[in-house]
Image (cartoon, rainbow, N blue to C red):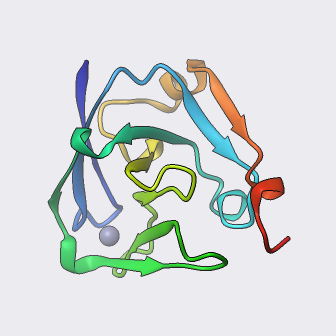
Amino acid sequence: MKTYRGSCHCATVVFEIDTDLKTLAMCNCSICRRRNAVMARVAAQRFRLVAGQDALTLYQFNTRTAKHYFCRHCGIYPFHRPRVAPDAYAVNVFCLDGLSAEEIARLPVRRFDGRSFSSVE
Ligand SMILES: [Zn+2]
């Protein structure tokens, strides 16, 4: 298992995850499709917030179960706590260092039908 470090655009929010990055996920729910996120899910014990706790702004909607975080300085979405797995973290793989867009494109992507799961739409 590798350790990846990630950050928001202004580098105020910095985090680390331990993962093999075997499968990524995309979701078609109302927020994921707007932020066009490609995500990697890790268990909470494999996620560490290194810096930027004070810069994280929490956004919630609908059932208010999921916790969507973004940096209040640069607006980037670095990670969230998913509604389907509140004990896990889903991170924005494009925030990870040392992982090119080409490498990301080669990884299998699981499509999650969050739109049907939503109780709003
Ligand atoms: Zn930032």
Residue 102 at x, y percent in the picture: 53, 24
Relative to residue 13, is residue 93 drawn left or right?
A: right
- Residue, x 56% and y 20% (percent of image)? 107
Q: Locate the C terminus by quadrant.
A: bottom right
- Residue, x 78% and y 69% (percent of image)? 119
In the image, 109 versus 42, the foreground residue is: 42
- Residue, x 51% and y 32% (percent of image)? 101
Q: Give the total number of marks visible in the rendering.
A: 0
- The part of the image, by quadrant, that contains residue 61 is bottom right
Relative to residue 19, is residue 64 drawn left or right?
A: right
Q: Where 101 sits versus 86, above or below?
A: above
Q: Ligand 1 is located in which of the four quadrants?
A: bottom left
- The part of the image, by quadrant, that contains residue 35 is bottom right
Residue 48 at x, y percent in the picture: 19, 49
- The part of the image, by quadrant, that contains residue 9 is bottom left
- Residue, x 51% and y 56% (percent of image)? 82
Residue 109 at x, y percent in the picture: 64, 28
Q: Where 32 sits versus 43, above or below?
A: below
Relative to residue 102, is residue 47 drawn left or right?
A: left
In the image, 119 versus 51, the foreground residue is: 119
In the image, 87 versus 47, the foreground residue is: 87
In the image, 11 versus 29, the foreground residue is: 29
Q: Locate the N terminus by quadrant.
A: top left
Q: Where 83 sits versus 110, above or below?
A: below
